[in-house]
Amino acid sequence: MDITAFNMNYFSLKGKNAIVTGGNTGLGQAFSLAMAKAGANILMPSIMPDDPDFTKLVEAEGVKAQYMEADITKDGVCAAVVKKCVDTYGSVDIVVNCAGICLIAEVREFGREKWDQMISINLTAAFEMSYEAAKFMIDQKSGKIINICSMFSYLGGQWSPAYAASKHGIAGLTKCYCDELAQFGVQVNGIAPGYFKTPVAKASMENPDRNKWIVDHTPDGRWGDIHDLMGATVFLASKASDFVNGHVLAVDGGFLVR
């Protein structure tokens, strides 16, 4: 046992190239910037408009960053994104499957159209991106896939059955891809965020009853700040997590224990 082999460079992502789906908005910005701060070049495929200011913020970390307009639910787009990363940066070392939506409706109003839309982006697109990236990662005998799961990977999904189903599904995808890709030196893990202060959560934060319930249900007694996710992302993307595989890491202030 050689404990002296470990050093802080294990957390460095210098020279690594990462795809972050939806990486120019919401929680995706935290994942993109965190890995840039650790040294990774970033490709951000998204259906959201380009945000040049955010791209410059990422590049200010001394790395390369590029936005790519891409609807990853369309046939062939995930393959094109992976090819773009390889052609632009030379490899695909990290994939963060972050892009997702949450549609809300009572069960009688939550029909097939809403179901298909959510499963397509939250689960099928993550599978497609992982599938395409895995081809390169297998050949290079290394890689990190990080799926953004949810507390609803474990809980029910009142008012959004497709969200809960897709997040249960992506936790399962994490485990089955780990089981197959580990032999090639590829780690596949997930992050399950709790309640975070983002624009999507604004309505809940401004609703006194809802806000109180969330804070009271979280042992830390607060909403998560977006930077609370950034260290977990770097850890799972780095050499420091090489023996962490098939795990879904809850970053939730303890929400799931209550």
Image: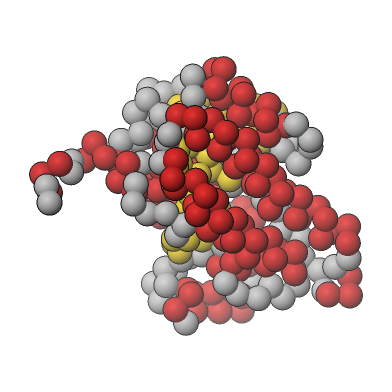
Vertical arrangement, residue 181 with respect to residue 67, above or below: below
User: Can residue 84 be spotted in the picture?
Assistant: yes
| 167 is higher (above) or lower (below) than 256 | above
Q: Looking at the image, which residue is at 60% across and 68% down?
A: 152
- Residue drawn at (48%, 75%) of the image: 256
Residue beneath the point at 40% across and 48% down: 236
Give 123 or 210, whichever is nearer the viewer.
123
- Provide residue 251's location: percent of width, then percent of height: 44, 62
Foreground pick, 161 / 75: 75
Classify residue 114 as left or right of residue 207: right
The color scheme shown is: secondary structure
**Snapshot quadrant of residue 203:** bottom right
In the drawing, does residue 14 fall left or right of residue 71?
Answer: left
160, above or below 84, in the image: below
Task: Determine which quarter of the picture holds residue 164.
Answer: bottom right
Residue at 61% x, 22% y is 84
| Image spot of residue 211 (x, y percent) | 57, 73
| Residue 182 spot, x, y in % from top left | 44, 47
Q: How many marks?
A: 0
Q: Nearer the viewer, residue 126 or 209?
A: 126
Q: Position of residue 5 (x, y in %)?
A: 15, 41
Can you tell which quarter of the image residue 220 is in?
bottom left
Residue 231 visible in the snapshot: no
